[in-house]
Amino acid sequence: MDFLPFEEARKFVRNLKLKNQAEWTKYLKSGRKPDYIPYKPERAYRGKWINLGDWLGTGRIANQNRSYKTFDDALQFVHALNLKSQLEWRPYLKSGNKPDDIPTHPDRVYKKNWKGWGHWLGTGRIANQDLKYRKFDESRTFVHHLKLKSINVWVEFCKLVK
């Protein structure tokens, strides 16, 4: 099969304005692809092929091929943002201000160093499911030694120790 030269084929594909792998795959299955455009351009243009982001013109680099800051450098950067929760992290991601070398999903990228969102954001908060509690008997003994007189006093005590 004779395919267009790489640069011409890439220009043709870029003019399709496809945004991602899913749209490229849908296009390939649509029956609209001309014979002079390869089904597997990464094979047909070996040596010239860079990645799908280059081929489609989006510039996107697959997550597994990205280079990120070291965990410690990323942590320092994120702490300086003073975000207080994961709920604040999401809008930050959408703001367009996140540098490319800071991962969107740090828990996936820094698996070995990951200690939770409180550590990542610098708040120190521990997720409820990760909290470690004393055994019931130990907790009861501790509370009895406090000699609190009512539930209201307990609630005030809890606010003080947070």
Image (spheres, rainbow, N blue to C red):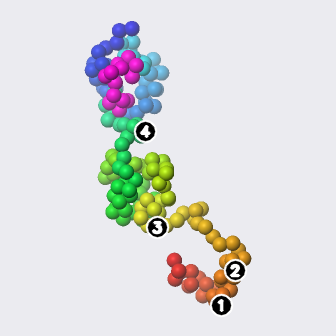
| Amino acid beneath label 3 | Gly
- Circle 2: is it few (<14), some (14-19), or many (20+) Cα within 10 Å? few
| Residue, disc 4 | 64
Q: Position of residue 71 (x, y in %)?
A: 40, 53
Q: How many marks?
A: 4
| Magenta region | 41-54
CA–CA distance between discs 1 and 3?
30 Å
- The disc, 4 or 2, on the residue closer to the chain's N-terminal end is 4
- The disc, 2 or 1, on the residue closer to the chain's N-terminal end is 2
Magenta includes 53? yes
- Circle 4: is it few (<14), some (14-19), or many (20+) Cα within 10 Å? few
Q: Residue at x 33, y 46 (%)?
A: 100
- The disc, 4 or 1, on the residue closer to the chain's N-terminal end is 4
Q: In the displayed structure, does residue 103 sit left or right of residue 130?
A: left
| Amino acid beneath label 4 | Gln
Classify 106 as above or below 37: below
CA–CA distance between discs 2 and 1?
11 Å
Q: Position of residue 17 (x, y in %)?
A: 34, 30
The residue closer to the viewer here, 125 or 38, is 125
- The disc, 1 or 3, on the residue closer to the chain's N-terminal end is 3
CA–CA distance between discs 3 and 4?
29 Å
| Residue, disc 1 | 147
